[in-house]
Image (spheres, rainbow, N blue to C red):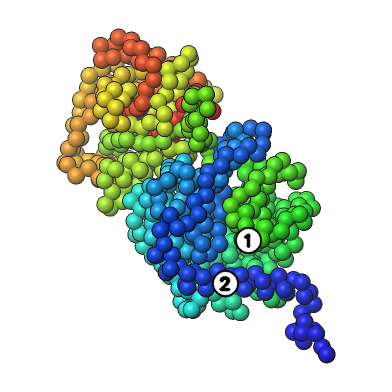
Amino acid sequence: MHSIYKILGIKNKDRFAEGIKTGMLRLFRAFLSIVLIPYSLFSCRHDDVIYPTIGTHVTDEVREGGLYILCEGNMGFNKARLDYINLHSGEYYANWYGAQNPKQMKELGDVGNDIQQYGGKLYAVINCSHKVEVMDPKARHIAQVDIPNCRYMAFHGSKMYVSAYVGSIADPDMLGSVYEVDTATLQITREVKVGHQPDELCVIDDRLYVANSGGYLTNRYDSTLSVIDLNSFTEIEQIPVGLNPTRVRADEQKHLWVCCQGNYSSRAPQVVVLDHNRVLKRIAVSCSNISIYGNTAYVLDGENKAVHRISTIDYTPVSSPMNLSSYEHPYGILACSDALYITDAKNYVSSGVLHCYDYDGREHWIAKTGDIPGHLCRVVGAYDLYPDPSGGDTTRHSPYIAKVYEYLPAMGQFVNELPKYEEGDDAASMCRKCEQSIANNAGGMVSLGGWGGYITFGFDHPVENREGLDIQILGNAFYMSGSTEYGSSEPGIVLVSRDENGNGQPDDTWFELKGSLYDDPGTQHFVSRTYTRESDTLQNPFHKHPYYPQWIKENEYTVTGALLPPQTKVISGQNVQRILDFGYVDNKPNTDKEGTSFDLSWAVDVAGQAVNLPSVDFIRVYNAVDEVLPQTGELSTEVSGAIDLHVE
C-alpha cells in the first residue's frame, strides 16, 4: 500500500505535518474569533483570571530605557498581556498594563497583535477585541480606537494607519481595509480598500505599502503588496511579490523587505526586496518575522529555528545563522542598538520566554513572559511600579518632555506647518501634535513663528534646582563654517514657573532665566504686540500658506515679553547672526550641551531680582527677536526637545 505522503508527492513529512498544524491553528483561531467573541460580551472582569504584577530581577546589566512585550494570549480567552522590563534596573514586570490600569474592564483584551510607541503615546493593536488601545508612555489607558479585526499599524506625520481584515473566515473573499486615524483626535478620518487580509504595512515618503496575505483563503493566498498614495488615500498599484506576504519592513536605503511565507503545504517561502515596485532580490529563506537595524536584516526562520543575518547592501549573509534549536517555537524578534531580542512562544498555550543576545549571538539573559510573546517595543523612559520599601520614592522618571500645555506661535512662515494644522484642529489638538513632535525624545521640531510666539511644556516630574546646569533645551541652530562666533541663531527666552496653586496648570507666576543680553542697553523688557488676521501678508516664494495660526478663531491675539536687539550682519554675502554667550534657546548647536543648557539659579522676577526656586513645574520658551531677512524670512525660534539633566 502506498504511503499517503508519496501519493501527494510530499518529500518531507515532518515539514508537511508542521505546516498542517500551523495552518489549522490559524483556522482554529479565526473560527474562535467568530464563535467565542460574542459570548465574551456577557462576561465580567470578576469572572476572568486577574494576573498579578510580579517584579522579577532578570539581569544586572544596565541599559537605557525599557522594553514592552505584548503577549498575544490565546484567541477567545481575553489573555492579551503587556509585560515590561526596566532595562536600567533589570526588573521584569508581568502584566504591567493590568497594574497600571486596575479599573479597566476586561484588562487589555483579546489577542495582542502589534505595539508601537509614536510621539508621546503608546499604541497596541488588540485584534479580536477590535480596537487599538492608546496609552501614555507608562501604559496608562488614554482611549481606544474601534477598528474591526485590526491587525498592524504604521505611522506618518500626525496619522496612524491600521490594517484590518474586516471580513471573516466565513467570508474570505471580502477585501481588507486600511484605516487612517488622526493621532491628535484619535478619530478615523479615511478608509481605503486593499487586497485580501492585509497584514503589516510600512510608509516610505508619501507611499504606504501593505502586505496582502490572504490569510483566510488558505489554499489560494494573496500575493500582492498594495501601494497607497497618502495624499489622495487611494490604492494606486498592487505589486506581485510572492505567495502569502505577511511582514514588510524598510531599510536605511528605503528598500522594502517582504516576508512571503508561501503555501503551508508546499512552502516555497522567500524574502523579496524591492525598490518601490521593482524587485531587487529574491532570497530563498523561510521568514516568519524580520527586524532591521543598521545595514543588517535579522530574518527569523521559525521553521528551521534560526536567525539569518543578511546585509541590506548586497543581500549576502553577514555571518552564519544563529542557532535556535533549543526553542520550541521562535516567534518575535527586535534588533536594537545594543541588543537582539527574540521570543519563544513555547507551546502557544502557556508562558513563553524572552531572550536577550548581543550581536555575536551570545545569550545574556532570559525572562518568563505571558502566553505567545509576539511583539516588542523599545522605549526611551525607564518606569518602575514600586516604591522603596524603606519609604523612599524610587520611581524612575523620563528625562524628556512629557506634556505640552500651551502653543501660541506668532505669525511666521512655518506656522501651520511645524506642526501641521489640519481642518478642525483647535488649541488642544495642536498641543497634542507638538507633543508628538518633541515629547519623549521624538526627534521632531516646533516653530514659534515671529517675535513673542511661545510654547509651554513640562516633564512627568518637577525639575529640581541643583548645583550647576539643570535643563537642556534643543533647537536647530548651527555655526557658520569656520566660526563659532556667527551662524544661525534665532534666540528664544526661557521662563519657568512653579505649580503654586496645585491645579496642574501653568497659570502661576513666571520667572525669566537671565541670559547674557538681559542687561544689554538694547534689550527692551516690556513689549506687547497684537497680531491680526488681516495683517497676514508676510509671504515669501517658498511658503505661501496662511501665517496666522488657523486654529485661533478670534481675529487677533496679543503676546508680551522682552525684545532682544538685532544681531544679524552680512558676511561673505550671507545673513548670519552673532551667537549669544549663554541663556537662550536655538542659539547654539545641540551638540554644545553646555551652550544649550540652563541653570534654574538664573531665575529673576519681574524687577530683575534673583529668586530661589527649589524646583519648577512648567517651562515656557518664546521667540525674543524680531528680524525679517530678505532671503530666508523671519528669524523664528524652533524647539526640538528638552532634557532634565538630573534624570538618567
Q: Nearer the viewer, residue 395 or 320?
A: 395
Q: Which mark is residue 348?
A: 1
SS at badge 2 = helix
Q: Quadrant of the C terminus?
A: top right
Is tag 2's residue or tag 1's residue first in the polypeptide sequence?
2
Q: Which residue is mark 2?
A: 28
Q: Residue 462: x percent and y percent?
A: 40, 25
Along the horizontal axis of the image, is 237 left or right of 252? left
Query: Is 455 in front, or is 149?
Result: 149
- Disc 1 element: loop
The CA span between labels 2 and 1 is: 13 Å
Q: Can you tell which quarter of the image residue 260 is in?
A: bottom right
Indicate which disc residue 484 carries.
none
Q: Quadrant of the N terminus?
A: bottom right
- Reply above or below: 199 against 10: above
Q: Is residue 172 above or below residue 448?
A: below
In the foreground, 48 or 181: 48
Mark 2: few/some/many CA within 10 Å (<14, 14-19, 20+): few
Q: Give the answer, above or below, for where 10 lies relative to 306.
A: below
Q: Residue at x 28, y 14 (%)?
A: 605
Residue 526's quadrant in the figure? top left
Q: Is residue 121 shown to the viewer in this render?
A: no
Q: Residues within 10 Å of mark 1 (few under 14, many from 20)?
A: some
Nearer to the camera, 72 or 506: 72
Q: Residue at x 55, y 69 (%)?
A: 29
Task: Indicate the amino acid at tag 1.
Answer: Tyr
Most extreme residue toward the front, as rendered?
47
For this view, does 45 lie left or right of residue 257? left
Q: Which residue is drawn at the image coordinates 43% and 68% (left, top)?
A: 39
Amino acid on which the number 2 mark rests in the picture: Phe
| Residue located at (33% from left, 51% from top) | 185
